[in-house]
Image (cartoon, rainbow, N blue to C red):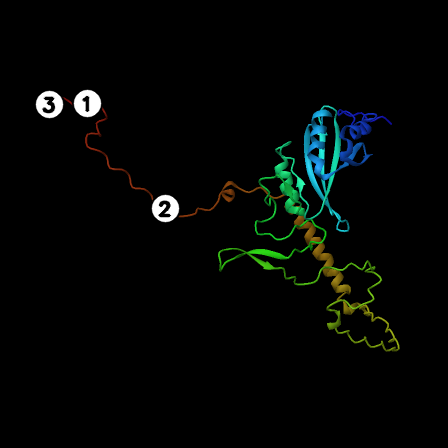
């Protein structure tokens, strides 16, 4: 399968490892190629010259990182790893130097000024001393911090913890006091249960067992009660008879006549159709005639 990518391949050139070994000479203690990168282990006192040769003669222009590694079982427990990048060749090389707690490593700040910050970090985390670094101070931990956190013998909880004191109005250091021990993983199945009593379970009181149920004879089911329907034994109980039938027939005939009368009502007179007066009002008095209005509405005669 062919992988298409915009970046060029970083596979080392043929014979590059041998060329670097011959160029560095006796400074190289070990050399190998892994994962497309070349790893060189050089003598501690020759690290500055070796890195200068790689930078100037082999185009490894950039110092990308300085890392530390701790192997407590070794006489020289620390490894300082310089990671170089060739921008023009798109290739990386790792250079390693071994050191003990009391053996300083030459500083490479004269080759790359950025190494000052990187060497301070390795010093802070591992305690490696760099000879020639004029500003070798802690960079990640506090100024009063004791120890180096990335060492394998440094406890995970640390030796002291800091907090802000309201009484002193400043940050104070106190010894670490854990409310409980660190967790212990026994990898036992929680469904199968543990072989030991968990803390706190010894205080639990087991509930008493429930009493066994007593067997009793099933009660006999009674037949459901049904209501007796009401019936009439004789016609007199319902009011029926010959007289009742005759009265019912007369009422039916009268009802038919009333219905016919409603369907064709007789014509009423106009007086009957008019509604009744709602109130009685006395007749209105005639209006008084104005003076001069008897002779008509023309002009008055002369000499009057």
Q: Which residue is mark 1?
A: 299
- SS at mark 3? loop
Lower position in the chain sequence, tag 2 or tag 1: 2
**Circle 3 or circle 2, nearest the eye:** 2
- Which quadrant would residue 243 be assigned to in this image? bottom right
Give the number of callouts: 3
Q: Position of residue 298 (x, y in %)?
A: 22, 23
Q: Position of residue 44 (x, y in %)?
A: 72, 39
The answer for how far apart the CA atoms under marks 3 and 2 are is 48 Å
The answer for how far apart the CA atoms under marks 3 and 1 are is 12 Å
Q: Which residue is mark 2?
A: 281
- Which quadrant would residue 206 be assigned to in this image? bottom right
- Image point (78%, 29%), residue name: 20
Q: What's the mark number on residue 303? A: 3
Left or right? Give the position of 189 relative to 281.
Answer: right
User: Camera-side residue: 162 or 42?
Assistant: 42
User: Camera-side residue: 120 or 189?
Assistant: 120
Q: Relative to 241, is 218 above or below?
A: below
State yes or no: discs 2 and 1 in contact (Cβ < 8 Å): no
- SS at mark 2? loop
């Amino acid at each position: 399968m062919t992988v298409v990518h915009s970046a060029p391949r970083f596979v080392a050139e043929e014979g590059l490892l041998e060329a670097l070994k011959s160029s560095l000479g006796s400074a190289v203690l070990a050399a190998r190629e892994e994962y497309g990168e070349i790893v060189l282990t050089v003598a501690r006192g020759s690290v500055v010259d070796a890195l200068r040769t790689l930078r100037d003669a082999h185009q490894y222009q950039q110092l990308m990182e300085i890392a530390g590694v701790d192997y407590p079982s070794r006489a020289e427990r620390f490894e300082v790893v310089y990671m170089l990048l060739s921008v023009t060749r798109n290739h990386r090389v790792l250079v390693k130097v071994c050191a003990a707690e009391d053996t300083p490593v030459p500083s490479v700040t004269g080759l790359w000024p950025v190494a000052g910050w990187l060497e301070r970090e390795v010093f802070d985390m591992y305690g490696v001393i760099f000879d020639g670094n004029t500003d070798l101070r802690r960079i990640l931990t506090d100024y009063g911090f004791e120890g180096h956190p990335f060492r394998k013998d440094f406890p995970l909880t640390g030796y002291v913890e800091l907090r802000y004191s309201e009484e002193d109005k400043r940050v104070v250091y106190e010894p670490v006091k854990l409310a409980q021990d660190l967790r212990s993983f026994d990898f036992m199945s929680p469904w199968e249960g543990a072989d030991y009593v968990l803390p706190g379970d010894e205080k639990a009181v087991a509930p008493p067992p429930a009493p066994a149920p007593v067997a009793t004879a099933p009660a006999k089911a009674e037949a459901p009660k049904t209501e007796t329907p009401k019936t009439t034994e004789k016609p007199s109980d319902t009011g029926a008879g010959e007289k009742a039938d005759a009265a019912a027939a007369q009422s039916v005939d009268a009802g038919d006549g009333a219905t016919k009368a409603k369907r064709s009502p007789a014509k009423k007179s106009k007086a009957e159709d008019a509604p009744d007066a709602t109130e009685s009002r006395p007749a209105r008095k005639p209006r008084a005639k104005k003076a001069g209005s008897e002779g008509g509405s023309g002009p008055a005669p002369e000499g009057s």
